[in-house]
Amino acid sequence: MSSRNNNYEHLEGGMGPARPGAGKKLQWRKLAVACTTLIALVWFLSPRGDGGDGLLPDDVYPSYTTTGLHQNIHTAKPPSPSKFPALPSTSDPQTVPTSPETDPDPLKTVHCAMPHSSTSSLVQYALMIDAGSTGSRIHIYKFHNCGPSPAYEYEVFKQIQPGLSSYAGQPRAAAESLDVLLNEALRVVPASLHSCTPVAVKATAGLRLLGAQESIDILDAVEEHLLSAYPFILPDRDAVAIMDGRDEGVYAWITANYLLDTIRVDSPAGAAPYAVLDLGGGSTQIVFEPERAENEGVGLKDGEHKYELVFGGATRLLYQHSYLGYGLKSARGSVHRLVEFIDSVRKPHADIDEEHMSRIPSPCLAQGTTKEVEIPQVNGEKKLVLMAGEDIGSFDACKRVLELVMAKDAVCELKPCSFDGVYQPSLLDAFPTGKILLLSYFYDRITPLIGSTDL
């Protein structure tokens, strides 16, 4: 096995914001969990596009519709519990359960003895599986029906590695990889409620990066496995699906700004929404609401980057883009592939070490470190090589490699562009006074360098 230093372990190990043990060290993750909770509520409980009544009233979670069309980095602590929507309760807060272990009766609630409606159960559960590029996670939510709409009680979270995209060509194995998560749901949800508990599986960039047929095969296998092996229900035809990159970024923007009290109906007057940058394993999202009008010369030009959002009684025009292939893991893989290609052109006959692996100097590894890397080949196979920092670790050389990977010189048809030829207004021009919220791997990779107590 190759030697690695601790810094490289920090960059390579784990599942980003969801790696084991991270929650104890990184308290700010509570915001990410809360965001996921609200995203789940959007999927499960918000009004549908057919205009039907949603399960949540506007004062709990406003309805929304879409028509698809050096800044201050915000690192605030998560909102206090009083900022989360909740139904009035006379219960002693210390007696309110926060997990199955503290719940005296999973079939009941401490908030009331009878449901608000005779047609509703006293409590209900919902399951959301986030199938990301680096792993899959399940969020098991408990709600009570003491009021006219379901109210959140607590969540159970569990995660596994690797993600569904690691099972290319093995759809059945991909589906069965979720058994650990679903068995946890069987344990948490009371048996009498299994048949009325909805489950949804939302995949992100990992599956988007696979070929269309491979992704379809995996999703079909997951859906069939859920229907044949588990008692839970699929709430609609899109319960098992790949989340569109546009929606992924905008949902993160909605949930983060909702939690930060900038876009609610009762938000303080003049509250300015935050820009949201979300660095995942397979893609990166950026979403913000430009502050300046188009007649000032810095507004949004027409194109797919425009996203019209109606939320909380207000119509907002957002800029959004999902950079598929530029997540932390996928971009790092592109760097390794480019370094290997450059080395093969420069030196057709690579050095072979004692383990019969090609040894390739990499300017993007720290001096004295090595890393075993799998390089995809044209025939579909993978070649194992040894990337070596040796004595050539160089910021300038690595920067040039990164500029090539990011296609900084790509043709910019609609100016201005960020990278890869993608139109993006300058944040300094279109968002000069706003704050930026960094999510997922952004936070995960900054924390070891400056410490979580500084964030």
Image (cartoon, rainbow, N blue to C red):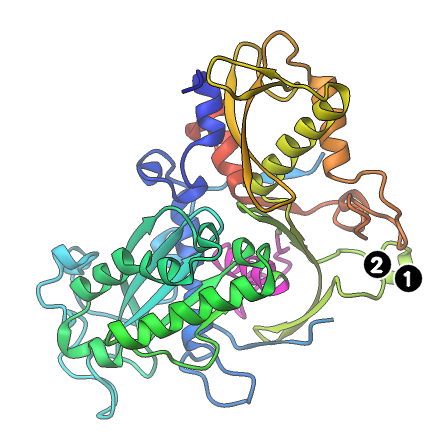
Mark 1 is surrounded, within 10 Å at the Cα level, by few (under 14), some (14 to 19) or many (20 or more) other residues, namely few
Foreground disc of the pair 2, 1: 2
* In the depicted structure, whether residue 420 falls above or below residue 45: above
On the image, the x and y values in percent for residue 177 come to: 33, 56
Query: Residue 284 got which mark?
Result: none
Q: Is residue 60 visible?
A: no
Residue indicated by mark 2: 299
User: Mark 2: which amino acid?
Assistant: Gly
Q: Left or right: 345 with respect to 18?
A: right
Residue in front for this viewpoint, 417 or 52? 417
Q: Nearer the viewer, residue 393 or 308?
A: 393
Above-or-below relation of 307 to 27:
below
Label 2 element class: loop
Residue at the image position 46 percent from the left and 46 percent from the top: 134
Residue 303 image offset from top left, x and y in percent: 81, 65
Q: Residue at x 28, y 58 (%)?
A: 181
Q: Is residue 98 left or right of residue 328?
A: left
In magenta stretch: residue 17: no
Instruction: Indicate the quadrant containing the N terminus: top left, top right, bottom left or bottom right.
Output: top left
Decide if residue 346 is in sight here.
yes
Q: Is residue 25 above or below residue 318?
A: above
- Name, please, the residue furthest toward the left: 104
**Residue at the image point whose x is 47% and y is 53% from the top:** 132
Q: How many marks?
A: 2
Magenta range? 246-274
Q: Amino acid at mark 1?
A: Asn
Q: Does the magenta segment cover residue 247?
A: yes
Marks 2/1 in contact by CB < 8 Å: the verdict is yes
Circle on res. 295 = 1
